[in-house]
Image (cartoon, rainbow, N blue to C red):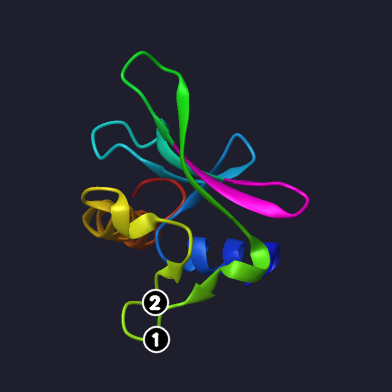
Amino acid sequence: MDKDALAAWAISNGWRIVAGHPSLTKPSSPKEAIVRMVFKATVVTVEVKKPAGKWEKVAGAPYGAVEPDEETGLPRGLGLEAIPSIRMLMQENKDRMVFERMRGPAGA
């Protein structure tokens, strides 16, 4: 997968762009990213925000080593499966985005 394919996958699976990075947000604070993907020239890294507010790299791989898993859809090679509750967090973010669209832009 390349940068564009990873970004498209992330957006379609509940990630949103926060501070220029595809990110997953806290359920209680949807504007605060807690997991993000950082795209660099030849690699993508996954970072998790520590309670102290610092970002910690938990995984990374060259774009060529990242490919979608046929069963789960998660990109293999990024270590997302090693992050506890990543699927649940992605689903919560995706559900929140769907409900925001249903309410409309004015929150009506």
Tell me: residue 89, above or below residue 69. Answer: above
| Segment tinted magenta in the rendering | 38-47
- List the residue tagged with mark 2: 73
Residue 2 locus on image (x, y percent): 68, 68
Q: Left of 82 or right of it: where is 6?
A: right
Dominant secondary structure, magenta: strand
Residue 21 locus on image (x, y percent): 59, 43
Near mark 2 (Cα within 10 A), the count class, few <14, some 14-19 or many ≥20, is few
- List the residue tagged with mark 1: 70
For the residue pair 80 and 101, the one nearer the viewer reads as: 80
Helix, strand or loop for disc 1: loop
Residue at the spot 58% in from the left edge and 65% down from the top edge: 6
Q: Amino acid at mark 2?
A: Gly
For the residue pair 7 and 27, the one nearer the viewer reads as: 7
Residue 85 locus on image (x, y percent): 21, 51
Look at the image and say whether residue 73 sits in the magenta stretch.
Answer: no
